């Protein structure tokens, strides 16, 4: 990670170093150590005031590091926090170093300040270190803290709301989603959207942004999967589906709601089908659902990973498309989306029984007029129903299902008259759609 990248993340003038004293400085160090990978961090808060006894250290932590033989060993750190308004006095460092000599098991002592250390203090520490080489002494001043905070945007986001640039907030959003499956403030995402043309948005960041949008409600206001080049959408889809097992495993372990992640992956698949060949996207999913030696994953695993994505994709298209099609009653289609009137159910929160359950999705009924032409161009016989309601998406029917989905999304949101792009690794392959169908999909209304 380069210093140039870090400087783009951090807004040093927005971090109140002058006020970083006492508990505030200790909290800052606590989360910095956590971000550095420390284990068994103990914040020795001895009381509610600044004078609480801490036994010569404010924080204890352990780091696991490899030794010269390649074996991992544990190193015990002490951290002393000294918040000041001016240069830290030498006596404070001398006292901290002398105190640690009574504890030979301490491998490293950090003296951290929000200001600076004088040159005489640094010279004294070098001389002391020569006499007591067993314990390493580190002096972290304001410049050191600023550099470390620049490497940990999620820590800055946690402690100093205004300390990050939009690029820094984006990095924090990426870290929180992929590492913790946590979501960020919608206000930060709005800020990034407004500055999206000036910020470099990577694949992991784009997926994290989409997941955050669904966690907060909808992707409609900020369509991250469409507000980029088609190849970026494709690569984000590839990254998402190839990490589906990782994401589902983390969801199960952490108990996070699967809804936003399922909607994110389904949205990326749909956005990719809008541009790329359905056969290619189907093959992408099949490859993602194979083992390390190319063997298919067990059927139960495939169903567990794939079914929620395909069901989400199908359910949305069925209702959105049918509500805008003359073959179906719009009122009947919209009933599925209707929510309970809050004025009718509000006072139930104070009753002993609560409001009655809403009708399940299985209670949705549809009436289809098979004599009316299909709005999106499916050529259906007099007794044929809408293909969206006739197919059951599985790994075996993936190609046909994606062909149906592709025709719907391209008819509803036409791109242009330009040819369908090929996947980067498959430039020599032809589109699976015949020329007549392909041209029809991109025909726009005047």
Image (spheres, rainbow, N blue to C red):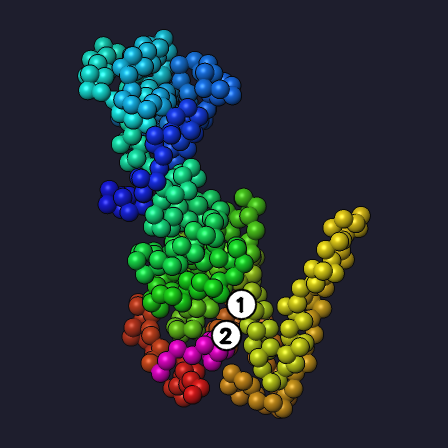
Q: Residue at 47% across / 49% down in the picture?
A: 185
- Which class describes the residues within 10 Å of circle 1: few (<14), some (14-19), or many (20+)? many
Q: Quadrant of the N terminus?
A: top left
Instruction: Inspect this view and state whether residue 119 appears.
Output: yes
Hey, which quadrant is residue 111 in on the image? top left
Q: Position of residue 12 (x, y in %)?
A: 31, 39
217 sits to left or right of 103 = right
Q: Which mark is residue 405?
A: 2
Q: Residue at 39% across / 86% down in the picture?
A: 439
Q: Secondary structure at mark 2?
A: helix
How many marks on residues? 2
134 in relation to 224, above or below: above
Instruction: Inspect this view and state whether residue 306 appears.
Output: no
Q: Quadrant of the C terminus?
A: bottom left
Q: As rendered, which of 310 and 223 lies closer to the eye?
A: 223
Name the dominant secondary structure of the magenta segment. Answer: helix
427 in relation to 214, above or below: below
Q: CA distance from mark 1 to mark 2?
A: 9 Å
Q: Position of residue 272 (x, y in %)?
A: 41, 68
Q: Position of residue 275 (x, y in %)?
A: 39, 73
Is residue 318 within the magenta segment?
no
227 in relation to 375, above or below: above
Q: Residue at 34% across / 32% down in the picture?
A: 17
List the residue tagged with mark 1.
Answer: 313
Q: Earlier in the sequence, mark 1 or mark 2?
A: 1
Q: Secondary structure at mark 1?
A: helix
| Image marks 1 and 2: residues in contact by CB distance under 8 Å | yes
Q: As rendered, which of 157 and 277 lies closer to the eye?
A: 157
């Amino acid at each position: 990670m380069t210093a140039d990248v870090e400087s783009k993340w951090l807004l040093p003038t927005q971090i109140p170093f002058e006020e970083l004293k006492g508990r505030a400085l200790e909290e800052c160090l606590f989360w910095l150590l956590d971000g550095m990978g420390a284990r068994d961090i103990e914040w020795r808060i001895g009381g509610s005031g600044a004078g609480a006894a801490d036994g010569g250290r404010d924080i204890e932590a352990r780091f696991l590091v490899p030794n010269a033989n390649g074996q991992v060993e544990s190193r015990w750190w002490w951290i002393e926090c000294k918040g000041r308004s001016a240069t830290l006095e030498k006596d404070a460092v001398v006292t901290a170093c002398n105190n640690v000599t009574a504890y030979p098991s301490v491998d490293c002592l950090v003296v951290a300040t929000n200001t600076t250390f004088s040159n005489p203090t640094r010279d004294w520490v070098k001389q002391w270190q020569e006499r007591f080489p067993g314990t390493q002494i580190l002096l972290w001043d304001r410049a050191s803290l600023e550099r470390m905070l620049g490497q940990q945007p999620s820590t800055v986001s946690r402690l100093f709301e205004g300390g990050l640039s939009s690029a820094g907030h984006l990095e924090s959003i990426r870290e929180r989603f992929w590492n913790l499956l946590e979501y960020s403030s919608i206000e930060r995402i709005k800020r990034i959207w407004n500055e999206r043309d000036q910020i470099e948005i990577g694949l992991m960041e784009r997926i994290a942004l989409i997941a955050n949008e669904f966690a907060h409600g909808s992707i409609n206001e900020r369509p991250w999967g469409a507000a980029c080049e088609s190849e970026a959408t494709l690569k984000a889809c590839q990254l998402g589906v190839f990490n589906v097992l990782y994401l589902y495993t983390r969801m199960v372990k952490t108990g996070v709601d699967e809804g936003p992640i399922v909607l994110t992956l389904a949205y990326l698949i749909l956005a990719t089908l809008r541009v790329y060949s359905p056969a290619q996207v189907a093959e992408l999913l099949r490859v993602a659902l194979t083992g390390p030696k190319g063997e298919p994953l067990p059927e139960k695993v495939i169903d567990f990973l794939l079914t929620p994505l395909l069901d989400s994709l199908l359910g949305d298209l069925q209702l959105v498309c049918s509500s805008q099609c003359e073959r179906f009653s719009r009122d009947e289609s919209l009933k599925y989306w209707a929510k309970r009137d809050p004025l009718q159910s509000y006072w139930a929160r104070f009753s002993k029984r609560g409001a009655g359950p809403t009708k399940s999705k299985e209670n949705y009924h549809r009436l289809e007029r098979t004599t009316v032409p299909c709005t999106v161009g499916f050529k259906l016989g007099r007794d044929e129903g809408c293909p969206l309601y006739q197919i059951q998406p599985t790994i075996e029917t993936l190609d046909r299902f994606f062909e149906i989905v592709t025709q719907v999304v391209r008819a509803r949101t036409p791109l242009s008259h330009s040819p369908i792009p090929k996947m980067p690794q498959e430039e020599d392959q032809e589109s699976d759609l015949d020329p007549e169908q392909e041209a029809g999909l991109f025909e726009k209304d005047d």
